[in-house]
């Protein structure tokens, strides 16, 4: 879509407004329809990703029945299309009805071209991201990173690191809160490595009692202890040739950490009750949700082991820090579970989208996944609501004050530039790509001083 002019269908019967909108979207390939029949014809012929539609269409130009019927048919014919409904000033009720039927957004007359362009551009971005995620979901596991929805810059950076590290044999430490997808990334490391054809063996160090963890890791000989009826290799041996994933390593008992350190240094294991040193060729990936620096200071984790397991450290951002990624991930999960349960759901209502963006997600991706699984089962309408998700929400929907958002972004950019430039006005202006007088104006506007 970046190489061709973006297609935009405008459904409007007023010739004057048609001309205004054509001018407003001169960079687009604008398609125009005056009624329901011509709108559906254009939709079938050109498949525009975004539709800008008036509700007052002939033969009910003074009402909304024909506009709402057109909206329903458009979404039935092309469910992925982003329809932005244009309503009369103060017509909040029909705007809400339109969103309930599946419209992506609404805009109230009179037309402000800057705001309308922003809404349309955002609709295109969302459509492109959804199309890309749908393409990835349709692939039959051809890429180890398919299951990871990296719509935010932080997660894209994580995926790039995974791709660089995977072909090596470096011991890797994944650090992140519970539910951020550490095991999924560990499997991606394995699948992208030369060991992909061998075993991926995972063990949760926090889920196994302390007295059993050593035998699980290193195995035991027959008669080593009561109940040891036969020789049993440990998970380290089983993973030989492949990848060993030690999850929640921060919970490993301190005594066992010394044995793990020896294995990492020597790459040999001794089964419990045995004397033979068994060489093991295995890639080790570790994960923890704990602050290991604190654990080391408190004597709960060995410092020498930390340096051994952290040849490469990858910090996984929590869901609340994945700006722009929460809604994309939510839509991807919704499509996945709706398909599993045979439900036809057209995305999220405005209150659900606002709730997803505003909620802190202490349980991260795992919590989001569980919420959406439940919502797919409980949803009674064509869209998932905040109530279906069990999330608190504001009745008035999201606060999207463009002036405030621009101001906050501008202020942060000025402050960062001044920090990078150590208060040097000329250098900061150069970093921002503006003149010195403009920078002084912005500093005065936001009460920012160069030595702050």
Image (tube, rainbow, N blue to C red):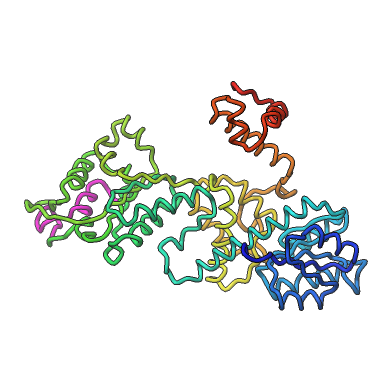
**Image height check: is 414 above or below 168?**
above
Vertically, is 420 above or below 130? above
| Residue 345 falls in image quadrant | bottom right
Q: Position of residue 264 (x, y in %)?
A: 21, 47
Q: Residue 86: x percent and y percent?
A: 82, 60
Q: Is residue 213 magenta?
A: yes
- In the figure, is residue 128 to the left or right of 273? right
The verdict on residue 325 being magenta is no
On screen, residue 432 versus residue 27, left or right, reads left
Q: Is residue 63 left or right of residue 375?
A: right
Residue 138 at least partly seen: yes
Examine the rendering and report whether any part of residue 381 can be seen. no
- Position in image of residue 126 (x %, y %): 63, 59
Q: Nearer the viewer, residue 411 or 308?
A: 411
State the residue lying farthest toward the top. Answer: 451
Q: Quadrant of residue 446?
A: top right
In the drawing, does residue 397 fall left or right of residue 196? right
Please report the bounds of the magenta region as a residue range. 208-229
Towards the viewer: 242 or 375: 242
């Amino acid at each position: 879509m970046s190489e061709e002019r973006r297609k935009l269908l405008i459904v409007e019967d007023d010739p004057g407004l048609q001309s205004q909108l054509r001018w407003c979207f001169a960079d687009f390939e604008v398609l125009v329809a005056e009624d329901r029949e011509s709108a559906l014809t254009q939709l079938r012929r050109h498949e525009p990703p975004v539709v800008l539609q008036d509700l007052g269409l002939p033969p009910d130009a003074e009402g909304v029945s024909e506009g709402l019927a057109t909206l329903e048919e458009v979404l039935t014919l092309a469910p992925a299309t982003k329809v932005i409904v244009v309503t009369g000033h103060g017509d909040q009720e029909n705007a809400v009805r339109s969103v309930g039927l599946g419209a992506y957004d609404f805009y109230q007359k009179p037309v402000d071209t800057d705001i309308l362009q922003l809404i349309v551009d955002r609709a295109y971005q969302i459509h492109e991201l959804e199309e890309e995620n749908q393409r990835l979901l349709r692939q039959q596991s051809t890429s180890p990173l398919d299951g990871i929805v990296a719509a935010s810059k932080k997660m894209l950076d994580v995926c790039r690191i995974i791709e660089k590290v995977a072909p090596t044999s470096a011991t890797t430490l994944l650090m992140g809160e519970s539910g951020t997808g550490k095991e999924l990334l560990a499997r991606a490391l394995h699948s992208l490595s030369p060991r992909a054809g061998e075993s991926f063996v995972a063990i949760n160090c926090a889920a196994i009692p302390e007295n059993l963890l050593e035998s699980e890791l290193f195995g035991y000989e027959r008669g080593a202890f009561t109940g040891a009826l036969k020789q049993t290799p440990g998970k380290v041996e089983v993973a030989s040739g492949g990848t060993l994933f030690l999850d929640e390593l921060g919970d490993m008992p301190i005594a066992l950490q010394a044995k793990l350190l020896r294995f990492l240094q020597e790459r040999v294991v001794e089964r419990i009750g045995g004397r033979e040193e068994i060489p093991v060729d295995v890639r080790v990936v570790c994960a923890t949700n704990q602050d290991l620096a604190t654990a080391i200071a408190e004597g709960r984790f060995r410092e020498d082991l930390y340096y051994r397991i952290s040849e490469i450290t990858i910090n996984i951002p929590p869901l609340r820090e994945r700006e722009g990624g929460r809604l994309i991930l939510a839509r991807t999960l919704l499509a996945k579970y709706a398909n599993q349960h045979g439900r036809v759901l057209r995305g999220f209502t405005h209150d659900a989208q606002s709730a997803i963006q505003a909620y802190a997600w202490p349980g991260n991706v795992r919590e989001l996944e569980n919420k959406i699984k439940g919502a797919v089962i409980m949803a009674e309408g064509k869209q998932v609501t905040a109530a279906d998700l069990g999330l608190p929400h504001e009745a008035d929907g999201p606060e999207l004050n463009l002036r405030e958002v621009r101001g906050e972004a501008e202020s942060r950019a000025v402050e960062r530039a001044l920090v990078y430039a150590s208060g040097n006005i000329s250098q900061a202006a150069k970093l921002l790509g503006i003149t010195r007088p403009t920078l002084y104006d912005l500093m005065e506007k936001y009460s920012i001083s160069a030595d702050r």
